[in-house]
Amino acid sequence: MSENTVRAAGGWLRCFWAGQEPETTYHDTEWGFPVTDDAALFERVCLEGFQSGLSWRTILLKRENFRSVFAGFEVEKVARYTEADVERLLQDAGIVRHRGKIEAAVNNARRAVELIDEQGSLASYFWRYAPDRDHEPNSMTTSPESIAMSKDLKKRGWRFVGPTTMFALMQATGIVNDHAYDCVIRDAVEDARRQRL
């Protein structure tokens, strides 16, 4: 067992942050596996933005509420949200009630519509930032690719998409494999990524 892993449910070694639920199930079934569906990618962008300054546990515990109030993260639907929708969401204790983050999610949906029109899909845009080679797991909070992605998205009008948030997105969606070398899930993620790339 390395400093980057913990013995969690079932006795398997998992990344150090996945020692209890709901983190364990998220880690084992989602984190790092390739995401190519636009709604799922948009959800991850939004949730990473909402997580900024908070624990991931907070976001996971509110995830179903986020999905409900943000129309399953269907980009076209969220892009049509109005100021009245923002005010409604600010009253919903089931999500993170932060005006800037809620407004960013609506804004980013509108920017995502533009990006899909231009690129064909969110996946074709985000996955072009996959690095040429892997890095040491848990060694970075940003990367040259996440910095470049952040800069380009900001230029396109996206918000809450800083380099650290975009690196977290890349980790979560399999654009990079940041599972520890001795994590039970690392090889499965790598196999799934090879099929995607």
Image: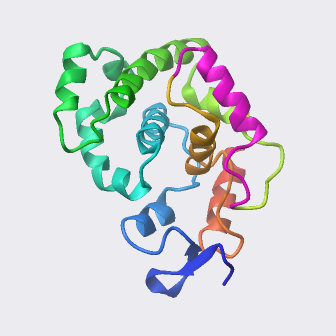
Q: How many numbered badges does the structure rendering display?
A: 0
Residue 153 part of the magenta segment: yes
Judge from the rendering whether residue 4 lies leftward or rightward of residue 53; answer left or right: right
Location of residue 126 in the rendering, given as x and y in whole percent from the top left corner: 63, 32
Residue 121, given in percent of the width and then of the height, sits at 56, 24
Identify the residue at the far bottom of this view. Answer: 11
Where 36 sits versus 18, above or below? above
Left/right of residue 166 with respect to residue 23 in the rendered view: right
Query: Quarter holding the N terminus?
Result: bottom right
Task: In the rendered view, tell whether residue 61 sits above or below residue 108.
Answer: below
Answer with the quarter of the image where residue 197 lies. top right
Q: Which residues are magenta?
A: 138-158
Q: Nearer the viewer, residue 28 or 14?
A: 14
x and y percent of residue 142 in the render?
Answer: 69, 44
Q: Is residue 119 visible?
A: no
Looking at this view, is 100 or 150 the one in front? Answer: 100
Q: Residue at x 34, y 54 (%)?
A: 58
